Amino acid sequence: MKGKVVVITGASSGIGWALAKEFCGRGAKLALGARRVELLNELTLELKSPDVLCVPTDVSKEIDCKNLIEQTIEKYGRIDILINNAGISMRALFKDMDLEVMHRLMDVNFYGTVYCTKYALPFLLETKGSLVGVISIAGYVGLPGRTAYSASKFAVRGFLDTLRIEHLKQGLHVLIAAPGFTASEVRKVALTANGTPQGETPRNESAMMSAEKCAFLITEAVRKRKRELILTFVEGKVTVFLGKFFPSLLDKLTYNHMAKEPDSPIK
């Protein structure tokens, strides 16, 4: 990764923060996008590298995504890897949920990926680079109480799978990375039925895969130019397997699993 130019969205916390540290440690040049500029500045101080560009970016806004890519090209002259990591979650039954929550999830998770990819793609094709989407196991199986989240992640997977085929003969590498439950603040800021953050995670964060391990595995998958990375054995690989061969059983297991969360909307 030495000398590679890597654009990472959602870099101010969680997996994005860990990815920035992982790629920086391997000698990459970084362009980091996030809304919370003060946290990006903290990350820059921690990285102690001259090759870090921080760009205030709300990925739900096309103009911000275009600006992120333009500033990256202005500073480095190329893009080797784009990691679409920015995302938000939600927790509510669809019947109780304001439709604005659905719009918000799609704007950030799906259209944020679309916007950044649109403006970075010409440069990725020049370098035969890597286009990465960080989705979730929720992009393979519908999670009850997470309708907008699953819908957005399924959409990202379909979008990136199609781009891989469209550019099959042009050397573009497309990786779909699907972490299982990973320790981060994503559940704390997940939207409730009326669009307000839920504030507390309903899960034991200490029992989950760390963001650092997740970032290491994603970086290795980029290095090896894998097409798919499904993380964790039970919540990841086994879930995807059951979805292919025993879908009705998976429906029941998923329902029961999500119903066990504290204050779960699933009864």
Image (cartoon, helix red, strand yellow):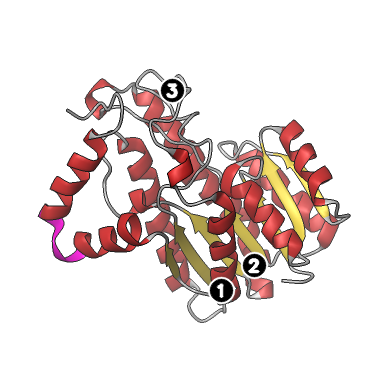
Q: Is residue 125 left or right of residue 38?
A: left
Which quadrant would residue 194 be assigned to in this image? top left
Q: Are marks 1 and 3 in contact (CB under 8 Å)?
A: no
Span colored in magenta: 244-248
* Residue that mark 3 sits on: 198
Asked whether the beta carbons under mark 2 and mark 1 sit within 8 Å of each other, the answer is yes
The numbered disc on residue 124 is 2
Residue 115 appears in the rendering: no
Residue at the spot 46% in from the left edge and 65% down from the top edge = 163
Q: Quadrant of residue 50?
A: bottom right
Please tell me which residue is depicted at 42% across the width and 37% down the height of the picture.
204
**Residue at mark 1:** 172
Where residue 152 sits: x, y (%)?
39, 44
Badge 2 local density, few (<14 within 10 Å), some, or many (20+)?
A: many
Q: Amino acid at mark 2?
A: Leu
Question: Is 165 or 101 nearer to us in this picture?
Answer: 101
Q: Residue at x 85, y 55 (%)?
A: 49
SS at circle 2: helix
Which tag, 1 or 3, sits closer to the chain's start? Answer: 1
Whole-angstrom CA distance, mark 2 to mark 3, is 37 Å
Label 3 sits on what residue type?
Gln
User: Do callouts 2 and 3 mark residues in contact (Cβ within 8 Å)?
Assistant: no
What residue is rendered at 48% in x and 78% in y? 168
Direction from residue 262 to residue 231 in the image, left or right: right
Instruction: From the viewer's side, name the closer residue of 190 and 207.
Output: 207
Residue 119: horizontal and vertical position, in percent?
Answer: 63, 54
Q: Is residue 255 left or right of residue 18?
A: left
Secondary structure mostly taken by the magenta-highlighted segment of the chain: helix
Mark closest to the chain's N terminus, 2 or 3? 2
From the image, state whether disc 1 or disc 3 is nearer to you: 3
